[in-house]
Image (spheres, helix red, strand yellow):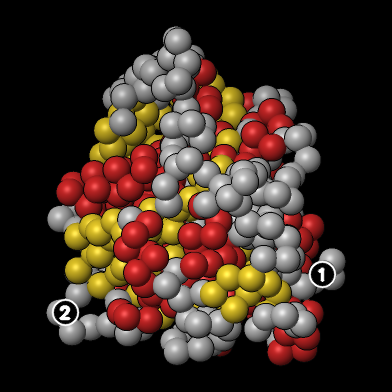
Amino acid sequence: MEYGIKSGSADKQRGACLVVAVFEDAELSPSAQVIDAACDGLITTLCKHGDIEGKTGQTLLIPRVPELQAERLLLVGAGKQADYDSKTLQKMVSATMRALSSGGIKNAGIFLAENRIDGTTVADRVQHIATTATNALYKFDQLKSEADKNGANLKKLTLFVPERGDMKPARVSLDTGEAIGRGMKLARDLGNLPGNICTPTYLASRARDIAKQNDQKVRILEEKDMADLGMDALLSVSRGSRQPAKLIIIEHKGGKKKDPPVVLVGKGLTFDAGGISIKPSAAMDEMKFDMCGGASVLGTMQAIGEMQLPLNVVGIVPSSENLPDGAANKPGDIVTSMSGQTIEILNTDAEGRLILCDSLTYAERYKPAAVVDIATLTGACVIALGAHASGLFSNNDDLADELLAAGEASRDRAWRLPLWSDYDEQLKSNFADMANIGGRGAGAVTAACFLARYTKKYDWAHLDIAGTAWLSGGEKGSTGRPVGLLCQFLMNRAEF
């Protein structure tokens, strides 16, 4: 898909299709007003007759308007003007892409960045449109015998801005939005690949490709390297698999040489059967998505590489499978983590925290400015927050506020949950320093409290994305979240 930026009056534009917004109660966006005046009140008449009501995401494609130089006109509903926000814009852009794709349209001029949203600039809205459009056009058909050709005709989108003075910052934001969109696409592709293709070795290979394309440094630790470091918690998970574990490290050196990096740690369980504590068979195929935390880190590293973000960032992805085998962890086993702390494994399906804890200890060597781990960690977080917000835990209020603000700005939201010492009681073990589960109550919180024991030497936050990383049902597939949140967080840190 090719994107462009332009400024000009809507009624003077050529092309296959123009896209303008219509609010409820027949209120028209600035460009819709221009077209309405040029077409003798056409849009007002359509609103009056109920052809379009302006409800968010409603679309009406008009094949030919004689007074316009463009071949077609697409009206898209924007809801109530008083309630118009970034989430509405996101829904409008997604609906626009569906309408353009199904209409067999080759190119379109989109007049949606002009509609004001409190706290945003035109450039901000351009970035949001580019990311959303790229994400809305996503398809995963590379493993089908015939590719899905729906939407294949759409080749170019031109985003119109109100004034010529908006064009320069908008071009920068367009490039940024595209980069984030492509990072989300990478994360979605990795998540959607089956476990027999997307193995730890495959993830490591893709990491090498990302680093090579973006002038980043990559290092892959093999099982022997991890054993030498004392990563027995991580390696205990991979013992039940024929696939060797990998610890993937990518370094983006965009800041000053001595600036401490932000470290992202992503859980990369390429398939999780639960080990000896095996999962129910229903929906177990979705456990290929248990590496979406790692996928989001790789997608983010690609995006910031394309942006040439002026910040030092390290991405760490511990990757393994969790399968039942004669060598696999057993309930009651005790392992020693890289930090020296011992862990009683009461449930082998609580394996994500075992590969993360050693990775969080490994992150200490970078003397990080902050560490954020991302993991599809607990079903309890899905029960608490559903699919709308990722769970956020942190040992630092400022860091938590940064992530929450980045989530709001990117519409990839998180919600902070407690990390109180009261919950540590649930992790007590009679035989080791801690147990790897804390019982039925507050499962997302006790999982975060477990990780917190390995993060005392730096500012740290944990994102539990078990509810947001993928969708089930008819729209089953990876969402690419929280690449948008992470990119916005890093851009804010770099003041990009």
The N terminus - image quarter: top left
* Residue situated in front as seen by the camera: 189 or 283: 283
Q: Which mark is residue 256?
A: 2
Secondary-structure class at tag 1: loop
- Residue 143: image quadrant is top left
- Please give the name of the residue rendered at 35% of the width and 69% of the height, measured from the top-left corner: 228
Q: Residue furthest front?
A: 326
Name the amino acid type tagged 1: Gly
For marks 2 and 1, the one nearer the N-term is: 2
Give coordinates of residue 177: x percent, y percent.
35, 51
> Where is 414 relative to 131, above or below?
below
Q: Residue furthest right?
A: 440
Position of 371 compared to 390: left or right? Answer: left
* Residue situated in front as seen by the camera: 329 or 77: 329
- Please give the name of the residue rendered at 25% of the width and 59% of the height, measured from the top-left corner: 219
The C terminus - image quarter: bottom left
- How far apart marks 2 and 1 lie (CA) works out to 45 Å
Give coordinates of residue 216: x percent, y percent.
19, 58
- Please give the name of the residue rendered at 59% of the width and 78% of the height, measured from the top-left corner: 342
Which residue was labeled with disc 1? 439
Position of 321 compared to 245: left or right? Answer: right
Q: Taking the image as drawn, is residue 170 in sight? A: no
Name the amino acid type tagged 2: Lys
